[in-house]
Structures are given as structure tokens and as C-alpha cells.
Image (cartoon, rainbow, N blue to C red):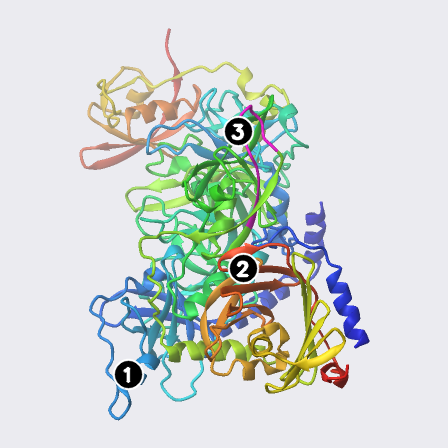
Amino acid sequence: MMLLAAFACLSMQDPMAAVAASEARRVAVIDRCAAAVCSVMSMDSPGGGSGVVFDPMGFVLTNYHVVGEPDKDYAAPEPPDGVDPVEWRAEHLPTGSQHYKNKKVGLPDGRLYEAVVLGIDPGSDLAVLRLLPKEEGQTWPWCDLGDSDELLVGETVFAMGNPFLLATDFTPTVTFGIVSGTHRYQEGQGNRMLVYPDCIQVDAPVNPGNSGGPLFNERGEVVGINGRISIGDRGRVNVGVGFAIASNQIRNFLGDLMAGRHAEHGTLDMSAWFMTSRDGKEHKRGVFVQQTYRDSVVVKAGVGLGDEITRFNGIDVRSANQLATLVGVLPADTWVTMRHRPVLPEGGFGDERQITVKLTALDTGSSRNDETRLASRVDRRIAKDQLVARWLDSDERDVAVAWSRVGPAGEALEAIAHGDRLRLTIGRKVYVRAGGDDGFAIEGGAARDLTLDERERLRRELVANPLLWPRGELAQRLDGALLLGGVHVHGQPAYRFALPGDGDCEAWFFHDGAPAGFAFRDPVRRAHVQWFVRDRQLRVIVDRELEPGWSCGERSTGQPEEQWFKRGS
Amino acid sequence: MRSMSVVLAVAACLPAQKQDFGEAYSFDERKPKSRVEQTVDELLPSIVKIHGASGLATINAYATGIIVSDRGHILTLDQILLQADRTRVVLYDGSVHDAILYPADERLGVRLLKISPEEVDGELRPLWPPSEEEARYRTGQFVVSLGNCFRLAEFSEKVSATFGVVVGKANTALRYRMADVKYDGDIILTDACNNPGHYGGGLFTLDGRWIGLNMRLLDSKETNTMLSAAIPSRDLLPYLEERVLGKAREEVTTEKVPVWTGIRLFEQAGRRSPPAYVDRVKRGSPGKELGLRIDDLIVRIDDFSIRSCAEFRRVLEKYKPGDTVRVMWKRGTRVMEGEMKLAEEPK
């Protein structure tokens, strides 16, 4: 009824004017987007796919199956004359045993660029390349990643790319359609490779050569990477069922991909079925654990065969496909929560309980050894600069930043930082770093000088903890840092940066530049410590083990007061 | 310091531990905005997934259906997978129900199923074909097609939606090689993609009117092309009214008298029906009057192409004694044509 009313309402306007306006909008969006769509080809063999530039510095997203396997006959370039070859290699060459020759990337500006393969994700068919500039300071037209969770069945989308390599001048082919389905789980090939755990199904024609190309929403944001199609019995052509990797899944791996990693997917080492089980006298439908490895993380946390899985990361589990989707989009080493109802020996199910576990890496048979990094330090520095450049939208410099947390035993830590000064309150003790190494402690009402350990602790807190950095100083604080990879913090993807210096310190940031946590080697506890922060949620990991019971307060800012850092206060 | 202490004091009072890691991946959806989104959203609760018997690689054990009554009637395309005791219906909420089968409509090639409405949580959301006036469709009109193609949706997952226009109207009987399409009325051709599993789903206008039931893909081996098509919903009404509303059908009340042509075709027992070569024509019969001879090959009756003896018989079933049909036949290399007045078999 409502629909009919809407229809009547619309038809009162001049329908041709509405169609013309909609068409004009579409043409404008396509015109803008087309400039960022590229053809990706290998240097020396025919065939190829598509890709999209998602950053002005020439970072390109495409499918793993477009870049293919690492090259066996890869020959590293030689250092130019007159430079220290060892230093040059450390700076300009990837590390490890598996590498790619550069790819050819054609853009609609009609030019052919060389591009470096930076990161690969064979598990779900993604790869990131970086275009090499033809002149210094060159930038490229780009399209931002959109929010694929916003997509709704029936929404207008268009796919771009170079199907059947039709365009020899690299102007992309545009096809138009609607979202046919969301959150589809599509199985992979071989040893769990090329799984599409959470893809968007579209009826916009996608054909061979479209692989790696972008799927746009009406606003021209990249909401997916077109990678595969369901086919009828007519061979590899479109039958109106194409699948695109969701942009929100891509974001989860973007940190690793831009940092040159072989992205790893997380797994619970468990399979579950949607089926009927007997709960007392009643038949109950739900998702039940069907198989596990004996050393699976969930088994260690107390999950057994036949248990019902009810929630995963705060979402009700309604089908096995959905659980596979929820897990499949997460990288390895992600901490997740899951609720289950244990099956009782006498029949029926016990009370719901919650476990917190860290996903292990899914073995795809192509997994990295940790040494392999396809990106050089130069690539990683450019990636870091690009990410940080997006965050410099704040002039909040001369403010104090506060952060507090409460430990499991009720110990409260409060930190207030202003520039290179820091005031740290632990219970009744107060430590102040007044700038440089000059500081003092207040204990039992009396001030004294800092010990060496205390001095080091304050220095580290100030240098390594991005929660105490004013946003306007990010570029300065991250000067000399390198992009290390990605990390998942409380359900959101974040980037890890290795801070310069000897401290083994990492600072983590979300996509919008908000601090996500940090990691460091604690010399006093002799442990590797990680703090995950989002909103008021806090997790502390000490030597890969969760230390429960931590919570944190708001990060607040304000005008600094001089007396906070004065010895007499 | 005061302002800062307030903040920190608040922080310290927070609950010690939050339980979940936050929403890693939300399945919550925004509200539908565009016309297509709204239409799909409104229609999806009326579309069901159907799972049935299989066993052969070439037979898909899944299809789609449309709820047509709040008493649990579900309409779908009649397919081999629909076997008694082995047919299950999955509703929009993911619940699975055993279905009983109603007799199929042989002419339309559709069949009703029924699930028990008592087992359903909440209310069924039936659709009913719109009136003659409202069911009109025009070439070029936008349509949305809903169905579970390739079984991409399981349980509570949403079936697939495809978008396109009405490409045209066609009569299957006019087309060569459509032997497996039972329905011989006008069909709606569309470019909204139809694939295995989509069959039995619905074709809708953008304002949500149900104009067609998705048929099997029309397949031409000669040109390697396939067409998506649907049976117009208004043609489904007699069957639905008879079976769902309990109204008797008007047309089945008259007794059918077979027609007589006096033509005997050359036919041997075998798997395949051979082409319609004339073996003998009775004296004084309509066939003799037309001038048919032995070894003539009958290729067409009215708009129906005749490729086999079986088709010859099937097409003639559509007529009654007294009707005049236009017959085309081949004699040697010549093609001949003439009118034949069908008769009643002499006693």
C-alpha cells in the first residue's frame, strides 16, 4: 500500500525529467569513478584482469587470482652505482623467499604503468599493488572504499573493469545492476584458498577480465571487488550471478596487504552445522558443533562436540553459513567472544557460557613464513605517510590528553600528557616527567627524584601510547615509523605502526586515525604487552594471554594546567 | 585539575568488564530507501525456498515458491524434485516445514504445495495474482525477479533478486525446441536473470504487483542462447481459484470429443517419436480432402511446429471437431500448404 502511494506520488512529477536527472547523476558518478579503474596484466604473458586505485599515491586493489602465484624466476634489481649496496637492499627490496615481478597496469589516462605487488591474500582472493610514478610527486585519481554493510538487496550498483580485455586504451566497461544478495558465503578452491566468506551477489554482468575490478554503489564508493561468478552450463560467461568481495572484509586485511604481508585468515578450527537437536523433549533448531581439532582454540576454552553456538562477537548466530561468514572475514590473531550452551551427558543443554579466544591462522597451504614481506621499507613508508596524511585534520596541539584504566585488582592508573610532559597516577603514587628526563615522584606526600626504571616507564608511556598523543601531532610522532600490518581491535580493523627506536614499540590506529591501542616489550615484567582500546572497552594481552578485568575511561582533552606538572602539587 | 578529575572519576566507576568484543560484523540493515529496495523488502517474506528429491547430478534439488494463502498454500513450478514425503519448504524466518503435494496443473506446469500453518511462527504473508487489469505488463517495463538461484540462500538468508525489463511476449508453441515447456500460452520474456533454483519464484513490477511465475530457462541448443521467462500470473488464477479457493473450473465441465483426420503416421515403437511422415490416409477423411499422400512430412499445424508424431497428436488435442486448421507439409523438396476441416471419428 505504501509502495503504491509512493508510486502515485512519483508519477505526478514529470517522469522523463526524473529519469533524465537520475541518468545525469549516474553518468557523472561513472565519469568520476572510471578514472580510477585499471587493467592489471602480467609483464610478459597475455590475459589479465582489472583493479581500482583506492589511494592517490597509487595503491591498487585487485584479486589474488589476477596477480597469480609468486614468480619462481624473480631476479631482484641491482643497486645503482655509488650507494651502499647493503643499505640500498634493506631499503628497496622485499624480504623473504617469495616475490613477484612487477605488473603492468593500464589506466584510462591511456598510460601503462609498472606496479609493485605489495600484499596478497590468497585465502580470500585479494591483492594490493602500488603504481610506480612516471614523474616525481605523481598522484592518481582514486575512489574511496564504502561501507558494504550498508548495502541492501535491490540497491543499484555498477561494476567496472576490462571484461574480455575489450578496451585496448584501458577505458573501463561499465555494467549496471542491483544487489541480488548480501553476506553470501561461497566456498573456496583447493586447500581453503579463494574463499569468498562474505560476498555481495550482483546481477550486473561480471565476466572474465572483470576480476579484481570494483563494484560501486550509487555514490561512487567502492563497496566490493568483483571476483567470481556462478555459471550455468554454458562455460565461463555471465548468467546474472556475480560475486564481489565486500569492502568491509577488505578493510580487515588492508593493513597487512599494504604492509607487504601474506594476509592470514582466522579460524576457530571447528565446523558447525545448522540442524535439529533434541533439547529435553523438544526438537530444537540451531547451530551445533560438528567437528573440531583436538587442539582447537575453542576446545581449549571448553567447547565440546554437540554444543550449541548462540552468539559470536555480540551477534546472534542463526545459521552455519552466517557463522562461517562472521569468522571468515576476520584475520588470524583476532580476539573474539563466543557464547555456547554445552550439551549435557544426560541430554539437553546447560546454561549459556561465554568464551574469549584468539583465532588461529587458517592453513591455506600457501601461508607465509613470517620473514616474507613483499613490500620494501620504501613501500611501507609511503603507505604509512599516506594513512597518516588522512588524519591530519586537527589543530588540537596545545591540549592535555588524559587516559585512565582500572586493573583487575582495582588498581587505577591515570595519565595526563601535554607535549613532552606526563603525569601518571598509580593508586596513591604520582609520577611526573617534566620534560626531557627531568622528573619526580610524589609518594606519601613527599616529592623525590625518579629511579631509572620509573624514568624509562614514563618515557615509554609517552612515546608508545598513542592514546596520549594529541591528534594534531600524529605526523610528528609517527615520523620514521613503518607500517607493520593490520590488527583487529574490538571488531574494527586497525593499522599497526612500528615506532622508530629500540623499544619494540607499536602504535595502532583505526582507519579514521583514532588510537586503537599499542604494544611494547615491558622490561620490568619481561613480557610482550598489548593494549586494545575502543570506546571504553579494553583488553590487555600479556605474552599472548588475555589478562581479564581491565577497563578504561574516556580519553579527554582540555586546557593544560601548569600545576599538574609542578613539583609542589 | 578539577575538570580532569571529574572525567577520571567517571572512568573509574565504569563496570569492570564489558562482555563482548563489539560487533565484528553487523548483519543489521538500514531501512530500504529506493523503490526496488522497498519492493524487494516487502515481497521477500512471501517467497519460500523449496528443497526436494534429487539423486541425479543433472537435477537440482532446490527451487522457489510463493505463498498464496494464509492456510499454507504455496505455488511453484512443477518439477521432478517435488516428490511426496520428500518436499520441504523453508520460510523467510528460516523455519523448515514438510509440505504435502497437490495435483499439478498439466497445462501450466505448476503445482501447489501446502504446509501446516499451525507450525508457523507468526503469520504467513500470502500474495495473490492481481486482477486482470492490474496484472497487465508492457514491454520495456521494469521488473524484479525473486528466487533462490543456485541455492545461494540457506535457511533465513534472503533469496536472490534480479532486475531487468520485460523484453517481450511470446508464445512457446511458435518456437522450435521447447519440448520441455509444458505451458503453451503467452509467456513473459525478461532480461531479469533466471537460473536453476530461481524457478517457481516470482516476477514483480516495481510497485510490487505479481505479474509472473518464473519458468525454467528457455534453451536453444542451436544458437546456444537461453531466455528467462515467466508464466503470466493471470493465467494462474483458474488453477489457484480451483485449488485454493475451492472453485470448480468452468472449462473442465464440457466433455471433450477427439478430432479425426484419417491420417496414419509412420511410427515405430521406440524411445523417440519419429518425424510425422504420413503412412496412410483413409478415403473420405479430412486428410484425403487436403490432398495428403504417403511419405508427406507434416511440419506445421497453425502456429505449432510439428517435429514428431507425438507432437502431431498433442497439437490436435487442442482442437475440436469442426475446427479448421492450416497444415503445412513437405513433399520431396516442395513445401505445401492447405486447410483441413477436422471431423469426428465415424462410428
Q: Identify the amino acid type marked 1.
A: Val
Q: In front here: A45 or A385?
A: A385
Q: Residues within 10 Å of mark 3 (few under 14, many from 20)?
A: few
Q: Is residue A91 above or below residue A276?
A: below
Where residue B69 appears, as percent x and y from the top left, is 63, 29
Judged left or right of residue A53, residue B272 is: left
**Are marks 1 and 3 in one subunit?**
yes
Q: Quadrant of residue A407?
A: bottom right
Q: Which residue is mark 1?
A: A86
Mark earlier in primary sequence (1, 3): 1
Give the side of residue B156 with respect to residue B336, left or right: right
The span from disc 1 to disc 2 (Cα, nearest Å) is 36 Å
Residue B342 visible in rendering: yes
Q: Are marks 1 and 2 on the same chain?
A: yes
Chain letter for mark 1:
A
Per the image, the residue denoted by label 2 is A541
Q: Chain of mark 2?
A: A
**Disc 1 vs disc 3: Cβ atoms closer than 8 Å?**
no
Can the viewer see residue A174?
no
Give the residue number, with chain letter if any, for mark 3: A276
Position of A368 with respect to A426 (left or right) is left
